[in-house]
Amino acid sequence: MPAGMLLVAFALVCVLLSARYPWLVRFPAAAELPVAAAFNMALSAFEARTESAFKLVSRLLTSPMSMVRTALQLTPWSMVVLGFVAMAWRAGGIGFAAFVGASLLYVLGIGLWEQTMNSLALVILSVPISIIIGFGIGYLAFASKRAERLTNPLLDILQTVPAFAYLLPLLLLFGFGPVVGLIASIVFAFPAMVRNTMLGLRNVPSDILEAGEMAGATGRQLFWQVRIPSARYQLLVGVNQTTMAALSMVIIASIIGGTNDIGWTVLSAMRKADFGSSILAGIVIALLAMILDRLTAGFATRAKTHRSQKDIPFRAFAALVAAGLMVMYGASTRFDQLAAWPADWIADPSESLNRGIEALVLFTRPVLDAVKTGMLFFVMLPLKIGLQKVVGPASWGFQPGIWHVVGYVALAVSAASFALLKGRDVAASAILLVAILFYVGLTGLPWPVMVAVVLALGYRLGGLRLVAISGFALGFLLLTGSWQKAMLSVYLGSLAVILSFAIGSALGVLASENETFSRLMRPVNDTMQTMPQFVLLIPVVMLFAIGDFTALIAIIFYAYVPAFRYAEAGLRQVDGRVVEAATSLGTTRLQRLVHVKLPLAIPNLMLGLNQTIVYGIGMLVIAALVGTSDLGQEVYIGLSAGNFGQGMVAGLGMAAIAMLADSFCKAWQRHYRTRIRNG
Amino acid sequence: MTTRDNAPAAIKLSARHLWKVYGPGADGFFDSTGPRLGAEQSLREMRAHGHMPAVIDVSFDVREGEIFVIMGLSGSGKSTVIRCLSRLVEPTHGEVKLDGEDLLGKSTAELIEIRRHKMGMVFQNFSLLPHLTVFENVAFPLKLQGLGLKDRRRRVEHVIALVGLEGRESSFPDELSGGQQQRVGIARSLAVEPDVWLLDEPFSALDPLIRRQMQDEFLRIQNTLKKSIVFITHDFLEALRIADRMAIMRDGRIVQIGTPRELLLNPADAYVAEFTCDVPRSRLLTAGDFAVAGPAQAASMATVAGETGFDRLVEQLARNPDGLQVNDRHGARLGIITAASMVQTLASFTPVSPHAS
Ligand SMILES: Nc1ncnc2c1ncn2[C@@H]1O[C@H](COP(=O)(O)OP(=O)(O)O)[C@@H](O)[C@H]1O
Ligand SMILES: [Mg+2]
């Protein structure tokens, strides 16, 4: 009997026995290890020993931070606006400068200047620190093979561990307060700089270096005058990514609360269901993200296209700006309105916005509710708790009897037999396993079945190495008592990833075939990506209230983008000659797409899937804010209750799931590639 | 190119038994006298251990003021040879002498000095620094030396004028055409006023028309500067146009060294012959080569000089159906040429195709 059928048989036996032996579904508490408690103990021991060191770092960072903060607060708004507009003009031309000016006036006009400057202060401080750290590590990894071997896995871990999970240990080590936000944002942001530094320094064309050597450069001259300038574009891309990551984390970190910043403004308004205010503040975050993105990206592009533009030389420009700032300063000492934005210039449209939203929600409710309940009853809940429990008069409109079950089994068995007849025994077992899964649901599935399936699949795709990784990750989840919550994460995460991938890829395919659509979607995708994830939550919560469905939609908004981009890029990269050849054979456009382009683009689609998983799980933790009940929520609870152990275990559990998904995805890609190669 | 007929110039640069084997620990195959196991056995061992012998026992001299061309198919080791001469690549074994001094024994600091004053190199893909303007690119080697701004400006202006790029000083490389970019590369390599000029396929990336034009410019510059040049190309016609002497490389070895004429008329083996078989050999033949013994009818025949090129010769012959008399530069009679004798001579030069047996 093939291994697949053995698994099916094992699953059936477990499911049938589980009514009798509940520990098959619920891992016995007696066997769990007190990992959370151990973490707490270890931490307090560690804290006692190293307290002064962390307090020192914390103090070291506190004073520059409050300095930047105070400086930004005290500087007349007119000077800040002028400074930003000048930089924007330099980076992106007059149009962008106007955009920046209008955005900042908006911030002033709705009275969120102080909060915005507080958030900005954190970014302004964390970006240079991240860049220095990232450049330093990137340089070491570039210069020494040994350092590189240490750096690469570190980067992989930092990429797969959800951002949220950093907050917790930091919070406990450094104490509450905005400094934690600063440190978290540094930790979160510097890897991007490391990657780009390594990439940039390494990819300088060897003949340019040779030209430098032949010009008689010493080692140091070669590095600073040839290698660094040639890598300038990549380094600035690093600065751009670092800045965006820092901003994103600064916003997320504000859930710790207690700081008067823009993230907290959004969150507290959202909690009070004051969607008007939360949207107004959310727009500020979005504007901030766009400004910082286009500002840093603009400088990167400038470094790439070397044009002898008839531009004002940098020195003259700087002098001009300095003079302008000086004048502004003089003026603001004379006119108070230019120093502090007068209170009677502030408008608060949140009331009327709230009324508008209410009307909109009322108007769209019937449709949205239909979508939501349909999705819940027919897809989400069956996966979560199983058809066995979902199907009933209230949901599906009938009371299931024995014949329904028989019909379901017959359907599954005949589908599997059909696959078997076609000689696809793996597909046959997969069909039966999925049928069992939907019958009992992820939370009702006996854990031995899950473990067996994952291990078997791991062995098939990646050999013993993957079995070991899986065993380790699953063992952690079981022994720490996180299994049930973890299954909730898997349920929400896998559904979100599948939908994001399906939607993203489909749209990407469309965009590759239709230029107008592609051009239309580009700014939308850019916005979704640069926006701190947090902001995406607002409209979704507004429309769907809190819950799993809302989380699902929010994740999809964020995670469809990589699937879209990889699909579009992959299809566009397909060799034009192959397509031409196919055309000359008389294929239709659809045939060309399905039989020629898509198969050739599969490696790219797989990369897209990989990224979708990373993005999806990252967002899963943030979606905990809108009321999920999975591990992400545990992280969040640990965070707000100051229970380090609980939060840490949940965070590591999320990381384990992310790592596992990532490993499986990569193993599958390798498996696929070798299969292609061996025909 | 005419070869100098007086006493040969001094040797500027010489390579002796040069080897370059890529791969870690390739030194192990050599002791101070050469490959430990003899050349053939060593090569087999190297290949068996995954090493790549890119340059194999190469020796040649470059004389002062001479254009020495190395030519061969892609992958035959030309770039590696020229990089060994400048020590961009460390040779695994052998000797390189510049002005009689051992180049391979020089310390890093000495090497930097040599590159700053004695050597210039031009690269196939121009290798300009993208963030610097034309002026700054050309001035770059001078800036590294710490030369003052005034001297820098003077020298840069001089070489920029030499390559005909006046007016483009403040452009960036990506605003220039390929030909213009290579002019910048040439100017940069000449800015330090080197004695030895190394050019690795400088014109291969250019369109045929531009290539031709650049070759002319190159010859014009060399006529005024008289550098000692190693010039690499995979284009035999290019080699013919500019070489004083040339070496043909194959799979890391030099298979023949000589003047273009020698190579054309006496190819050492089928490989060299294959290169030359596409070349209209008439190109290299002069009236002297066609002169055959014949009856003296000096009065009725027009005379031509022995160096008269092929095209001129045909033209003359068309005008003088009776034939031509060939004299050398001292007026001594070398022989005569008639239409019939010319066709016969040409036929005897046509090579046997290396594919036909
Ligand atoms: N850094 C290197 N490491 C290993 N092999 C190399 C390296 N550089 C060149 N080679 C190999 O040495 C051979 C000669 O290369 P090269 O000197 O660039 O030839 P050419 O310039 O004539 O095309 C080629 O087979 C090439 O693959
Ligand atoms: Mg080469």
Image (tube, rainbow, N blue to C red):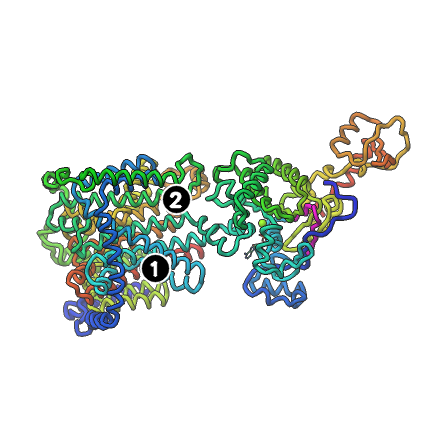
The disc numbered 1 marks a residue on which chain? Answer: A
Q: Is residue A193 magenta?
A: no
Specify the quadrant that holds the C terminus of chain A.
bottom left
Mark 2 touching mark 1, by CB under 8 A?
A: no
Identified by mark 1, the residue type is Asp
The answer for how far apart the CA atoms under marks 2 and 1 are is: 31 Å
Residue at which label 1 appears: A156
User: How many other residues sit within 10 Å of disc 1, few (<14), some (14-19) or many (≥20)?
Assistant: few
Residue at the right extreme, as displayed: B296
As drawn, A642 above or below B199:
below
The answer to whether B41 appears left or right of B181 in the picture is right
Residue at the bottom extreme, as displayed: A30
What is the number of the mark on residue A597? 2
The answer to whether A651 appears left or right of B189 in the picture is left
> Is the magenta region chiefly helix, strand or loop?
strand
User: Tag 1, which secondary structure?
Assistant: helix
The answer to whether B334 appears left or right of A425 in the picture is right
Q: Nearer the viewer, residue B167 or A599?
A: B167
Q: Do the residues at discs 2 and 1 belong to one chain?
A: yes
> Where residue B196 appears, x then y in whole percent?
64, 49
For label 2, being within 8 Å of ligand 1 is answered no
Identified by mark 2, the residue type is Lys
Q: Is residue A32 visible?
A: no
Q: Nearer the viewer, residue A35 or A298?
A: A298
Q: Quadrant of residue A479?
A: bottom left
Query: What residue span does the magenta drawing correspond to?
Result: B59-70
> Where residue B337 appears, x then y in whole percent?
83, 33
